[in-house]
Amino acid sequence: MNKNAKKRTVMRRVLVLILSLVIILPLIPYAVALVDGPGAVPNPGAQLWNEVRQRDGASAGVSQVQAVDGSVFINPYGERWRQFRMQQLVPIGGWLLVGVTAFIALFRLIRGKVPLEGGRSGKLVPRFSVNQRVVHWFAGTIFVIEAVTGLVLLYGRFVLIPLLGPEGFSATAAASKEIHNLFGPIFPLAVVLMILLFLRGNSPNMVDVKWFAKAGGLLKGMPASSGYYNGGQKSWFWMVVVFGIAISGSGLVLNFPVFGQGREIMEWAHVVHGVVAILFITASLGHIYIGTIGMEGAIEAMTQGYVDANWAKEHHDLWFAEMEKAGMVGVAPNALEEVKRHDDIDFKGFGSPGAKQKEG
């Protein structure tokens, strides 16, 4: 072998050695960090990111960014919310929704549709004014939009990815997010209008206690007396008020991060919004079922404003007695003067129509 060949061989060996050192030397601290025992060397990268993530609590920083949390490099609160969402909210909320749906289905199989025991009388009793019905359907429509889009964002990955694929779910989730954020700020207005138009008559009383004791008259052979609103309707109204305020307030905090709130406040707003939304949607299933396909004649109160006299007598007998006494049974449909008289009777005082009615 000549001298040139030997030189090339030596140069190749030197280059291989240098390249090996370049690759291996930076890995030595990480390899040492894996060694157990008192002599183990801590991983400098792990130490750095532990400090950055502020695992031991928030630490003051210095930044030229003049904004809320502007001096925080990485915020741990989002990870804490993500763990709560995936480990508690999603599974518990899912079982709650499935459980209530199954209970309603079982009730339908056993009890069936609640019929008018006396059949239809053909006589109409005015129940809800045009304003009440418009506000009810306005609030209901916004609620359903928010509920459906919210459930897509919460459970869509488990239900829709197998059906639509990743790309289809991505487009659906993106559209749901925009729709949810668009209609969300309108919901507080709906809640306020519901309070203004439906507050009167929703004061609880002893009649409601007896109504609950008889399961609301839903069980055969156990009729339950009630006034203009029964105990179940009053409970739903106050849930709308309490849940509506909670979900509206937390939603505005999340939708408009310009109120000066930090990430920790937004984390708690997420918790409130998610938990209340699941409870709100779950409670609405019973209200929607009874008000539509679960009870004969019930939906007519909100679609036509009138109910059959036998329906009023069977489900709101105390109110029916007041209306019969006032000559409001058997009125002509769409008789505006009768609706006006009906409003005067219903809202002559704070409380259910016929404030002097007996509570038993």
Image (cartoon, grey):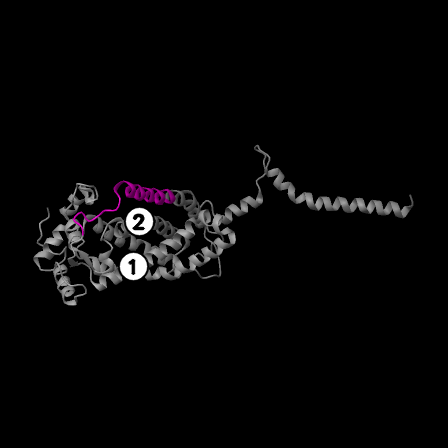
Report the residue at 35% width, 45% height from top: 97
Report the residue at 38% width, 54% height from top: 148
Report the residue at 47% width, 45% height from top: 55
Magenta span dominant secondary structure:
helix
Q: Which is closer to the viewer, label 2 or label 1? A: 2
Residue 139: numbered disc = 1
Q: Amino acid at mark 2?
A: Leu
| Left or right: where 62 falls relative to 95 | right
* Residue 244 seen in the figure: yes
Which x, y percent locates residue 150?
Answer: 39, 53
Which structural element holds mark 2? helix
Q: CA distance from mark 2 to mark 1?
A: 15 Å
| Left or right: where 348 falls relative to 185 | left
Residue sitting at the far top? 37
Q: Which residues are magenta?
A: 93-119
Q: Amino acid at mark 1?
A: Ala
* Residue toward you, 184 or 345: 345
Residue labelled with disc 2: 285
Residue 107 within the segment the image draws in magenta: yes
For the residue carrying disc 2, how many other residues have a C-alpha within 10 Å: few (<14), some (14-19), or many (20+)?
some
Quadrant where the N terminus is found in the figure: top right
For the residue carrying disc 1, how many other residues have a C-alpha within 10 Å: few (<14), some (14-19), or many (20+)?
many
Which x, y percent locates residue 296?
Answer: 23, 51
* Residue 58 seen in the figure: no
